Image: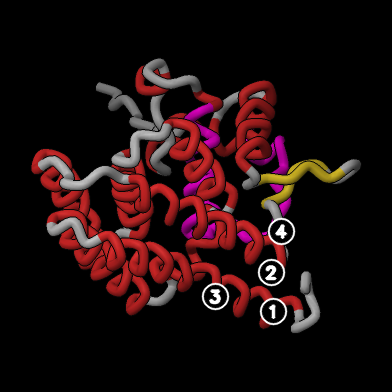
Amino acid sequence: MATAKTSKKLPSRRDAATAAGIPSPAEAQREPIAHVIARKLEEDVVLGRRHPRERLVEQDLCAAFDTHRGDIRLALFELEKRGIVERIPNRGAIVRDLKPREVSEIYSVREELEVMAVRILPFPVAAADIVKLEDVQREHGKAVDAGDLLAVFHSNVQFHRALFGLCGNGCLIETIENLAQKVSGIRSYAYANPGALNDARQDHMAMIEALRHSRRDELIMLTRRHLKPAEQAYIRAYRQRFGDGAGA
């Protein structure tokens, strides 16, 4: 009796995409694929997988995400609105190259807006809000201990969204978040330093204690201090890579 030959099945592009963490079609139905792509690309920038001035080639992205150019262009347009991607005539899209001066200007504005938020934040803070911040910070601490930089990024965003959300001013909250998105790509430079991650964790815990005991001056000081490491790490790395006079 002849024995049937068994052939080894090669993985499809969709199988490879799943292995790479790209959502399946069923999962993608929960969220527009362009939004998924934008989020994944932002994460790549935040984690230092993609660098300033790096080209984002539509054809390569189509293959990576197993989709068509329309979805890729929508994702790149969204990232351009957030200030993460820049479109160059005759070159296409690149990861935005933030100059040190631009970074300093953005962080100066961020500092004043975030301080404004904690100045107008009503005291005493409700116990339920304190518990929410503690829960988010617990996840952030676990991520720092595990070295899970993606979880560090997302839990950090959640912590500050919850913190500044307490001020109750929708316009201010939205502006703070928009400016934070513009410089999300520089966070990988601070994340490269485990000491900076632990310092951020300690700042978060001190902020919670300042809220618990209605210590506004301490909260303002922590808010100002907390912004410095990422800005300084990026500017230092940028000048090492492109020269002291670059983007001054």
Which residue is labeled 3 in the image?
A: 232
* Alpha-carbon span between mark 1 and mark 4: 12 Å
24 w.r.t. 118: above or below: above
Q: Which residue sits at x=67%, y=51%?
A: 95
Q: Which residue sits at x=38%, y=53%?
A: 153
How is the model colour-coded?
secondary structure
Q: Main secondary structure of the magenta part?
A: helix
Which residue is labeled 1 in the image?
A: 239
Q: Which residues are magenta?
A: 35-62
Residue 43 pos. (x, y %): 47, 48
Residue 243 pos. (x, y %): 76, 81
Mark 3 falls on what kind of element? helix
Along the viewing direction, whichever of 6 and 238 lies nearer the viewer: 238
Mark 4 falls on what kind of element? loop
Sequence-first tag of 1 and 4: 4
* Alpha-carbon span between mark 2 and mark 1: 8 Å
Which residue is labeled 2 in the image?
A: 100
